[in-house]
Amino acid sequence: MADNVTNEMLLEHIQRMQADISSIRTRQDTIGEDLHIVKGHMALFLQAELRKDTAMADFTARIERIERKLDLIDF
């Protein structure tokens, strides 16, 4: 049975393997692009979170300053 393997059969098999590898590379490239987009969105979310944290800290500082001026601080 192994003697029946011809060059054409080997060539067909190798061509199918090359097509499969090409398909895998294409999918891998797409996944890489998607991952890059997700990383960009994560960076934007983190920046927004930082802005919110900064605003909250500013509000807290203002409230504490107002409490001190009005002598409303509880000990």
Image (cartoon, helix red, strand yellow):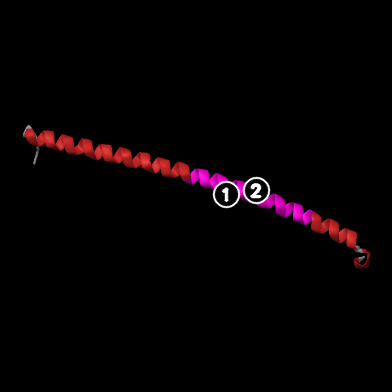
| Residue 27: numbered disc | 2
Magenta segment includes 29: yes
Q: Is residue 67 left or right of residue 5?
A: left
Q: Is residue 52 left or right of residue 4?
A: left
In the rendered image, which residue does mark 1 sit on? 32
Residue at 65% in and 48% down: 27
Amino acid type at mark 1: Gly
| Rendered position, 12 above or below 68 | below
> In the orientation shown, which residue stands out farthest toward the left?
71
Residue at 90% in and 67% down: 2
Amino acid type at mark 2: Arg
> What segment is highlighted magenta in the picture?
16-39
Residue 45, percent across and down? 41, 40
Residue at 22% in and 35% down: 59
For marks 1 and 2, the one nearer the N-term is 2
Q: Which element is circle 1 on?
A: helix
Q: Which element is circle 2 on?
A: helix
- Report, in whole angstroms, how far the alpha carbon at label 1 lies from the one at label 2: 9 Å
Q: Is residue 5 left or right of residue 14?
A: right
| Rendered position, 72 above or below 16 | above
Q: Quadrant of the C terminus?
A: top left
Residue at 36% in and 39% down: 48
Q: Quadrant of the N terminus?
A: bottom right
